[in-house]
Amino acid sequence: MLSQYPRLVVSVAALSLVLCATLLQAQEENPVSTSVGTIGYVAENLSEFDLKTGEGDMAKELTLKVDDKTVYMIDDEPATAKQALVVDASATVKHQGNVATEVLVTTKKAEEGEAAGEQ
């Protein structure tokens, strides 16, 4: 049956290649970055938050949006946006452009446990 529509087959194949190339280019232009800091402002509807990174002259604040694909963890346990997006929480955030893909919160209890394990 496909032999009856050779132009259609070639067109579909070409379109597939163009789509793949476009997706790869978009990923290259917007690579995944990781930022570590403290959560600042959190929007009431939990759609975005600020992450304060660095100190002194190196300090900056990133405003990151979240979507339905964003993954939240607290001390390596699954969490909700409401649980994780808390002002003053320590977080490592993976983001693509200004969209957070993972928000990994570490509580003081976990930090103290890690420090005790290092001694």
Image (cartoon, rainbow, N blue to C red):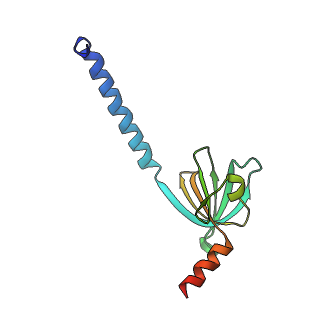
In the depicted structure, whether residue 5 falls above or below residue 55: above
Residue in the image at 65% along x and 61% along y: 51
In the depicted structure, whether residue 75 falls above or below residue 28: below
Given residues 112 and 41, the one toward you in this image is 112
- In the image, taking residue 24 as reference, residue 70 lies left or right, namely right
In the depicted structure, whether residue 112 falls above or below residue 99: below
Q: Position of residue 9 (x, y in %)?
A: 28, 20
Residue in the image at 61% along x and 43% along y: 68
Q: Quadrant of residue 59?
A: bottom right
**Residue at the right extreme of this rendering:** 44
The total number of labels drawn is: 0
**Residue at the top extreme of this rendering:** 4
Q: Quadrant of the N terminus?
A: top left
**Residue at the left extreme of this rendering:** 3
Q: Quadrant of residue 26?
A: top left
Q: Quadrant of residue 113?
A: bottom right
Q: Position of residue 31 (x, y in %)?
A: 46, 52
Given residues 28 and 110, the one toward you in this image is 110
**Residue at the bottom extreme of this rendering:** 119
Q: Position of residue 65 (x, y in %)?
A: 63, 49
Residue in the image at 55% along x and 88% along y: 119
Residue in the image at 75% along x and 47% along y: 45
Given residues 78 and 68, the one toward you in this image is 78
